[in-house]
Image (tube, rainbow, N blue to C red):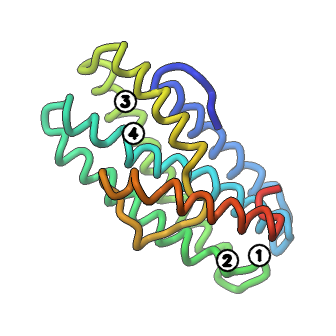
Amino acid sequence: MGHGGDVIAELTADHREVDELFHQFDDAPPGSEDRKRLVDALTIELVRHSVAEEQFLYPAVREHLEGGHSLADKELADHARIEHLLNDLQPREATDEDFDLLVREFRTEVTAHVDDEENNLFTRLREGVHPYVLEELGDKIRRAKKAAPTRPHPAAPSAPPANKLLAPGIGLVDRVRDYVTGRGQ
């Protein structure tokens, strides 16, 4: 979390972290505690990443790109599907019968979303948005990830201004829960 650079570099670095966590998951023995720990780490990373995108990236997409409203709506729909899968995974243990199946479904959704962002959205941002704006968005994304929730909250708003108002408070509660339970440590 917090890699530096413009918004595209920041989010791409997040994507590589997620890829690495998925590779670690593949290497962990089926049914092991390591798999549950890695799903928790993936959840923390992806929820922070998604909340930051929803607060700052997608409003910028709407503002700066032709067809930005439909692009942002598509990305938000991707996030909603991923967040519901994360919510379904949270109470499950790695030994649960459907754990690996849900992780595969989750990974498929995440991979498709990342591919679309990196091959379509980021290209359009690089071509259509001034580098200064991209740098500024990178800074905003990094700050937002620090205060963002660490658990899925599918019922929480995903658009400004409500998400900018509620996410820091929800994030604080999540971090306290994580500290008390040792999640993500």
Gap in Å between the C-alphas at discs 2 and 3? 32 Å
Helix, strand or loop at disc 3? helix
According to the picture, the residue beneath numbered tag 2 turns out to be: 99
Q: Amino acid at mark 3?
A: Phe
Identify the image quadrant of residue 176: bottom right
Query: In which image quadrant can residue 137 be found?
Result: top left
Which residue, given by chain and number where applicable, does mark 3 sit on? 122
For the residues labelled 3 and 1, the Cα–Cα distance comes to: 34 Å
Disc 2 + disc 1, Cβ < 8 Å: yes
Q: Amino acid at mark 4?
A: Glu
Looking at the image, residue 10 lies above or below residue 98: above
Seen in the picture, residue 169 relative to 154 is either above or below; the reply is: above
**Amino acid, disc 1:** Ala
For the residues labelled 4 and 3, say whether their Cβ atoms are less than 8 Å apart. Answer: yes
Instruction: Bin the neighbour count of mark 3 within 10 Å (Cα to Cα): few under 14, some 14-19, many 20 and up.
Output: some
- Vertically, is 153 above or below 49? below
Residue 102 in the image, given as x and y percentages of width and height: 59, 73
As drawn, is 157 to the left or to the right of 93? left
- Secondary structure category for the residue under label 4: helix
What is the crowding at mark 1: few (fewer than 14 residues within 10 Å), some, or many (at least 20)? many
For residue 117, the mark is: 4
Please give the name of the residue rendered at 60% of the width and 43% of the height, measured from the top-left corner: 146
Question: Does dot 1 land on a helix, a strand or a loop?
Answer: loop
| Label 2 crowd bin: few (<14), some (14–19), many (20+), radius 10 Å | many
Type of amino acid under label 2: Phe
Q: Which mark is residue 94?
A: 1
Residue 128 drawn above or below residue 41: above
Which x, y percent locates residue 112? 44, 51
Where is residue 2 shown, x and y percent of the image?
A: 62, 32
Question: Which badge, 2 or 3, is on the more N-terminal residue?
Answer: 2
Q: Seen in the image, is 40 located left or right of residue 102?
A: right
